[in-house]
């Protein structure tokens, strides 16, 4: 009998080799059409200028030796399009589960196979039923939110492919989540945020005060290609940017506040899956959280050991078809990775 020793996302998901948007990709791959001239960039705001300068200062460290044959993101985009079009995930279905073992297990649902990591619990439900599933006296060492912010792009995605988009929430909906009940004196609250001014203001001026949390840091996730270039140009305000914000808060009077850097720049090649964020648990537990820290992730689409994940697509990115697996025999011998079609 074989067990799963290691599971990694299929490497094709990270074949982001050149700066891109989907229109440019289509123009490039349907010969005979000229690319539109890129508009001249106007004045950058202070934050964008600071991130651009940081990227310029370390770009040589980010650069790899790109394969000269990898001149597009086509493979990654096609892989994701095929996955989305064939995915059979019912986000309206309410269910919960857990894996109390130390091994990754596989579960079947609606004709799909999902990987369940060790020591996890999960709830598939809308956020308005939060109090039905999370005990009122249950506190966590870290709470992560990746809200489905209301925006035009997701409306377009949803219109084009109902399986690729997700239900969006207003700022008032997010503010209403009773997180204040689930904090202890040093609970880290981490919120992924878009660059929209209304969303930025909502986190710092509405959500955090309501939850009894003070803003202590703003970090930036800068998305780069496999060659270290930003995935799109640094643009003037109100335009698409190659970075996202990560707001970090702590309850007032927390003894941890001084240990959190006020600003950090995190660089990685993004997944081709829309809004797929890099995992944060190991980053924070390695420096700022106690061993065996407990985590709650809201609006989750994947699972992490020792975390409770809550969302309407809580298992979506645990689909076995997205992974390369290393299998182990009972005698401890490890086989090579197997990519599932």
Image (spheres, rainbow, N blue to C red):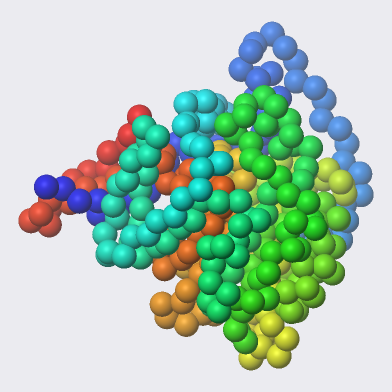
Determine whether, in the image, residue 37 is placed left or right of residue 336.
right
Q: Residue at x 66, y 56 (%)?
A: 128
The image quarter in which residue 152 lies: top right
Residue placed furthest toward the top: 32
Determine whether, in the image, residue 46 is placed left or right of residue 131.
right
Q: Residue at x 75, y 15 (%)?
A: 34
Residue placed furthest toward the front: 132
Determine whether, in the image, residue 116 is placed left or right of residue 289.
left
Can residue 1 be seen from the camera position used here? yes
- Position above or below: 220 against 251: above
Total residue callouts = 0
Q: Please tell me which residue lies in front, 120 or 56.
A: 120
Give residue 262's position: percent from left, percent from top. Answer: 71, 76
Q: Residue at x 31, y 65 (%)?
A: 100
Q: Please tell me which residue lies in front, 131 or 204.
A: 131
Residue placed furthest toward the right: 43
Residue placed furthest toward the left: 331
Q: Please tell me which residue lies in front, 285 or 16.
A: 285
Quadrant in which the C terminus is drawn: top left
- Position above or below: 247 against 115: below
Give residue 217's position: percent from left, percent from top. Answer: 71, 73
Can residue 263 be seen from the camera position used here? no
Q: Residue at x 68, y 69 (%)?
A: 178
């Amino acid at each position: 009998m074989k067990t799963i020793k290691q599971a990694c996302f299929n490497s094709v998901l990270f074949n982001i080799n050149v700066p891109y948007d989907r229109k440019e990709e289509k123009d490039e791959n349907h010969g005979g059409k000229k690319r539109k001239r890129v508009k001249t960039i106007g004045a950058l705001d202070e934050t964008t200028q600071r991130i651009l300068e940081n990227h310029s200062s370390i770009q040589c460290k980010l650069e790899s030796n790109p394969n000269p044959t990898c001149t597009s993101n086509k493979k990654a985009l096609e892989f994701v399009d095929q996955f989305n079009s064939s995915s059979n995930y019912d986000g309206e279905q309410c269910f919960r589960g857990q894996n109390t073992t130390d091994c990754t297990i596989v579960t079947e649902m609606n004709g799909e196979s999902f990987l369940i990591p060790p020591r996890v619990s999960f709830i598939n439900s809308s956020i308005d039923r939060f109090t039905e599933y999370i005990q009122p006296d249950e506190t966590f060492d870290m709470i992560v939110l990746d809200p489905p912010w209301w925006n035009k792009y997701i409306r377009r995605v949803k219109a084009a492919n109902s399986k690729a988009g997700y239900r969006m929430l207003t700022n008032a909906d997010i503010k209403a989540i009773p997180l204040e009940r689930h904090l202890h004196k040093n609970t880290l609250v981490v919120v992924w945020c878009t660059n929209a001014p209304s969303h930025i203001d909502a986190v710092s001026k509405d959500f955090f005060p309501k939850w009894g949390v003070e803003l202590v840091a703003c970090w930036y996730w800068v998305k780069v290609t496999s060659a270290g270039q930003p995935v799109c140009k640094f643009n003037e305000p109100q335009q698409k940017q190659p970075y996202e914000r990560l707001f970090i808060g702590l309850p007032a009077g927390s003894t941890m506040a001084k240990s959190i850097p006020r600003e950090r720049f995190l660089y990685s090649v993004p997944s081709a899956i829309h809004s797929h964020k890099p995992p944060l648990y190991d980053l924070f537990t390695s420096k700022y959280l106690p061993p065996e820290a407990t985590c709650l992730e809201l609006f989750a689409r994947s699972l992490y050991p020792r975390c409770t994940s809550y969302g309407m697509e809580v298992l979506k990115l645990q689909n076995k078809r997205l992974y390369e697996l290393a299998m182990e025999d009972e005698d401890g011998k490890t086989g090579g990775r197997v990519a599932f079609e």
